[in-house]
Image (cartoon, coloured by chain):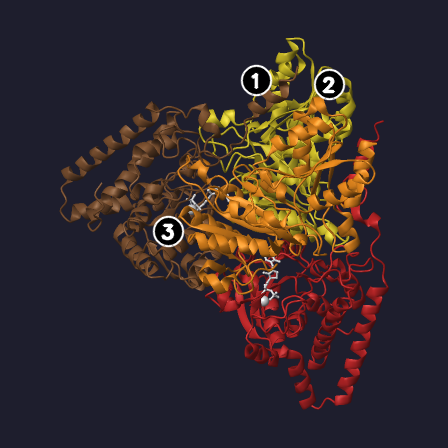
Chain colours: A yellow, B orange, C brown, D red
Amino acid sequence: MESLTYREALGRALADAMREDESVFVLGEEVGRYGGAYGVTKGLIEEFGPERLLDTPISEAGIVGAAVGAAMAGMRPVAELMYIDFIGMTMDQLGNQAAKIRYMFGGQIGVPMVLRTQGGTGRSAGAQHSQSLEAYVMHTPGLRLAIPATVADAYHLLRAALTQPDPVVFIEHKALYAMKAEVDLAAPVPDWGQAALRREGGDLVIVSYSRQVHYALEAAEALAGEGIEAAVVDLRTLNPLDFETIRPLVEAAGRAMVVSEGPMTAGVAAELAARISEECFDYLEDPVVRVAGEDIPISVSTALETASVPTPELIAATARRLCR
Amino acid sequence: MESLTYREALGRALADAMREDESVFVLGEEVGRYGGAYGVTKGLIEEFGPERLLDTPISEAGIVGAAVGAAMAGMRPVAELMYIDFIGMTMDQLGNQAAKIRYMFGGQIGVPMVLRTQGGTGRSAGAQHSQSLEAYVMHTPGLRLAIPATVADAYHLLRAALTQPDPVVFIEHKALYAMKAEVDLAAPVPDWGQAALRREGGDLVIVSYSRQVHYALEAAEALAGEGIEAAVVDLRTLNPLDFETIRPLVEAAGRAMVVSEGPMTAGVAAELAARISEECFDYLEDPVVRVAGEDIPISVSTALETASVPTPELIAATARRLCR
Amino acid sequence: MTRDNNGLGDLFREMLRIRIFEERVGELFVRGESAGSMLHLSIGEESAAVGVCSAMKDGDTFTTHHRGHGIFLARGANPDRMMAEIAGKETGYCGGKGGSMHIADMGLGHLGANAIVGGGIPAVVGAALAAKRQGTGAISVAFFGDGAMQQGILYEAMNMAALWDLPAVFVCINNQWGMGTRIDQATKSTDLHVRAKAFGLKAETVDGLDVREVQGAATRILDAARVGRPGFLAVDCYRFYGHARKDKSPYRDETEEAEGRKRDPVAFARAALTESGKAEAELADMEAAIAAEMDASIDYAIGSDEPPLEAMFRDVFAPGEPEPEPVAARLDRVLARE
Amino acid sequence: MTRDNNGLGDLFREMLRIRIFEERVGELFVRGESAGSMLHLSIGEESAAVGVCSAMKDGDTFTTHHRGHGIFLARGANPDRMMAEIAGKETGYCGGKGGSMHIADMGLGHLGANAIVGGGIPAVVGAALAAKRQGTGAISVAFFGDGAMQQGILYEAMNMAALWDLPAVFVCINNQWGMGTRIDQATKSTDLHVRAKAFGLKAETVDGLDVREVQGAATRILDAARVGRPGFLAVDCYRFYGHARKDKSPYRDETEEAEGRKRDPVAFARAALTESGKAEAELADMEAAIAAEMDASIDYAIGSDEPPLEAMFRDVFAPGEPEPEPVAARLDRVLARE
Ligand SMILES: Cc1ncc(C[n+]2csc(CCOP(=O)(O)OP(=O)(O)O)c2C)c(N)n1
Ligand SMILES: Cc1ncc(C[n+]2csc(CCOP(=O)(O)OP(=O)(O)O)c2C)c(N)n1
Ligand SMILES: [Mg+2]
Ligand SMILES: [Mg+2]
């Protein structure tokens, strides 16, 4: 067992992968000398040098495009997008190139790249540095999507992402970097594409991912004191989506809530709610409830920022009303 | 009554708006001398000149950014994105700038621009020229989204879009341009943000938009011959979303199907299905069914292209099984 | 504030206001009263802001980047409302929604600061197009850092400005660093104005040490833009402190930093004024007055309220338009079934 | 096909193959056998394809744009498999999924054509980076049109290539038009290589009339790239016909078009060969042989099958990986409830 932060676990995953596989390299803004805007790659340049921790100009589209080309030419690039909010500049390279190359070219070649980025609220960083844009990625055929909630997953999902034959968007949460946990990096982990049941409970199934898993667990603790037992599923990857873990739980409980920090409309919560509603229809006693981010930009004001996304209190209060 | 194509109705809307409002102008690739890649602006440059039909370089991000600035400075730009597939290059200007400016700046100013574009399959145009990406827009707070299915709406929705105080993405369907209809442009039209009930029917409610409305109507015709009466709702705008038209119909019928050409996962169909499932839960006899585009890129092969998105046959077959 | 910019005294006062304001922003952060820590101080870059803005006129519009406090002040911003915005307060320019990186004021032609490197650049193309069509005689100026020279959108915007002979100007404040990346680590072509020239713009690079030089170059470039010849100006200066408030620039060489800080446009102007006979007492008075003004802005910010929660759903769309439905309202309805 | 490119005869033969292939593509469309009408013929641009490709070596990689048939042929593509792909058939290079605008072949280093103007450009930065790291000695070449000179991504890519001394080359095939927009209607700076120079690349413009000139310039630029000095080459030529198969270029001046078509690199090379003593009969034989080869490619394409429907869900992800679930399968499950 080791005590690591989410940030450290990510850095360790990159280091271990680079040690094992010469073709792995990291590129992005401030990934080298600076050590990453959130410190994930701190210290790596000392061991791996500036070629494998490649500092780039501020050229997001170019960075992703370069990663695509490098991946096609036999490397395993890990491109870093400093904030997922900048994905708008890269969506052509990501959605029209990386995601479609294998298909358009009839399966001749894949694009085994990882795009590491981070999202979410929590730093009063304002409307262009606080978004949760995973739905854009989930909606794009051809992209895998991993989104770790725990320290162990920060490590294991990133290692797994680095073995995928297809492009993986890997979304960290800025509010989790300092989270610390005791982890056994050698312990068996769920397979890539398999959700983790973080808490059992027969009254309600809460399906979530990333930071909201912790909020859901916090809510579930509070609910347990009131006699409501909520299961909490951490999806870990949104593509592939592990519905087979969700199904039996919902069928048994008859109630489900999905929790996502991203804006509600046409987002990940919509997909999960639609999926559960259609697949578990005959077992549902109540509608599947969506607790998600508001359909508004995020304010820099801490008060408004906090109120713009789900909180443990909102999750618990909603669960109470649902299970009443 | 006049007989117009969808293409002509769009051009007419632009011309009428430009005649009435000096601040309206069109900018985009090939909108002037060429008359638009799909001919929508054909002939307009003769009346309005090259300043109001402004041909631009191939600079999608710059075009949208210029429209943002022009809108803030008191103009009403209609920017054209030749294919919605190119939205990936503009998502920063669209999603981080146009969509958020009013909010970030505390309501000081809006961005009254229209981004006209077109999407969808039907021309064997391949993976980067055939997409239905409306979900990206619908998921972005701050953007309005109009998506006309009929010739009359091609005119009226575009006119209405040009009076909105906020950015509107206006998505045409490439397979509808040649569609002709008798229209009375002066007849009363549903308000902006109001859906249209295109067909009544008590057994099933089909909720759709754009070209799929026609497919749904075609399916409904076939079903009627078999004793199944399906209502068909044309949403017209996805933001605002008119749920109040849908609700009573679904409550009465007890069954709903949503039909969208966009990829199923985390798309518009997911939002609609989730919404109906949660809001009409107690009235539903069957799960809300999603008939949507496959989660795959679109092939240039006509056979694969056609099979990648819903067809009238699939809609009808699904309805039959649902209502059996 | 008088907008008489002919004399160095005025230019100096403007620069000093920026310097002291930025110091107070740092203080706001230290006191835990700023909204977050993403505060980018423009200390060392005052001549760029003041020199260029002194060549601007009423009615001109502009966009800025994440390090734009100084530019906005030089265009006449009210420090109270700026500081309140930086604190995320209701009385700020944007009601506390925007913050340091999204300050704007339509009255002063400020079309907005931007947290996206390069994000605010193309808007000036549209604003200049509008000015040209409307015949207002105004120009539109985009301010950005050297880091944005590597963003493709800049070239799309410059190309359009040149193509359409727009009254647009692109001002690159080259403080030599973009976060931990020195300009020569971001590009081989550090002679920045050459790129703009290649796109057909009237382009210069000017040393930011002497604000009068900046004013001169800016006047040449902006005046040309006013008659339809778009321009580009790079102002060479140095980022005195860290990238954002928490950064201590460990990646920078100490001697380089020491040398860089010697290139202080405020100190240079002060020395020039003293040399030309300005009394020390007069300068000290000016400093004291500005310090008092800026201290007051901190008090104003701290004394102001957070925006009310009801403000949250406002301004997504225009007043009176259908608003996004709050999650709580949806939940109320969905959970209302018995 | 011999890859001996020293003599004009070989260069001519390559150009002629492109010319005749493109004519056959037009025929495929007219016969209603192409997949769609988005067919962009490179007639008039043969010297760019052949001249540059003759300076490339085995192992080099490249990306092309929507008008890339000629380039691919010049790099050794099989016309049968190309034509089949253009017809959307299973036997095509991409199994009928890609089509004219998305043809690729890893064996020949073709990292893909692109339907996004500028979309394929930055991939060569990555491919060149890989080649440099792997020490293969290969270069990577991006081919694109003059329209792409106005896409920001080009400048991001060129800047990175220069910064990292990559074996990358950017080739702009300047056929004077981007759809209905003449180059001077898209930019004020029509001297295209100047822009690349401003980013630190070795850059030239060459007239495409004489393929030997193109070959010479390409050799200079590509050889420099091979030793770490990235380059840019603009090849001036003329788009003989419409933008895509259906376009008749009504926006072009007839005299301009007539003049443009006089700048025919195939005719020019033919005349030069004749002048230097090549027998007419020999040339006619060559033409006949190529015509037969290209006719056969049409037959091959038409005789091939459409991809089977099962192919639809393949290749979204790698074989053996979890595939997207077909809508029909989902519906089957959801509707299976009794
Ligand atoms: C599109 C985008 N990429 C990256 C960032 C993160 N970032 C913020 S400021 C900055 C450095 C900018 O350098 P420069 O343009 O020189 O401005 P300076 O900070 O020196 O004023 C970076 C990388 C961002 N905000 N937006
Ligand atoms: C990003 C993008 N914008 C617009 C288009 C539509 N389009 C296809 S080709 C073309 C003109 C391209 O001109 P140029 O680059 O000169 O290439 P050419 O067609 O002359 O070979 C345009 C505008 C596109 N395919 N992709
Ligand atoms: Mg800088
Ligand atoms: Mg061209």
**Ligand 2 location (quadrant):** bottom right
3D distance between C-alphas at marks 2 and 3: 60 Å
- Residue A56 appears anywhere in the view: no
Give SS at disc 2.
Answer: loop
Q: Position of residue B271 (x, y in %)?
A: 65, 34
**Dot 2, crowdedness within 10 Å: few (<14), some or many (≥20)?**
some
Classify mark 1: helix, strand or loop: helix
**Disc 2 versus disc 1: nearer the observer:** 2
* Residue C275 in picture, x, y percent from top left: 16, 48
Residue A274 in picture, x, y percent from top left = 70, 30
Q: Which mark is residue A313?
A: 1
Q: What is the three-letter code of the residue carrying label 3?
A: Val
| Number of on-image labels | 3
Amino acid at circle 1: Glu
Q: Quadrant of residue A275?
A: top right
Instruction: Please name whichever residue, A103 or C317, is drawn nearer the observer in this view of the structure.
Output: C317
Q: Depth check: B236 or C318 in front?
A: B236
Crowding at mark 3 (Cα within 10 Å: few <14, some 14-19, many 20+): many
Image quarter hosting the N terminus of chain D: bottom right
B122 up-or-down from C29: above or below: below
Residue situated furthest front in the rendering: B1
Q: Which residue shows up at 57% across the image and 80% down it?
A: D259
Q: Which residue is mark 2?
A: A285
On residue C141, the disc is 3
Bin the neighbour count of mark 1 within 10 Å (Cα to Cα): few under 14, some 14-19, many 20 and up: some
Of the two numbered discs 2 and 1 on the same chain, state the one appearing first in sequence: 2
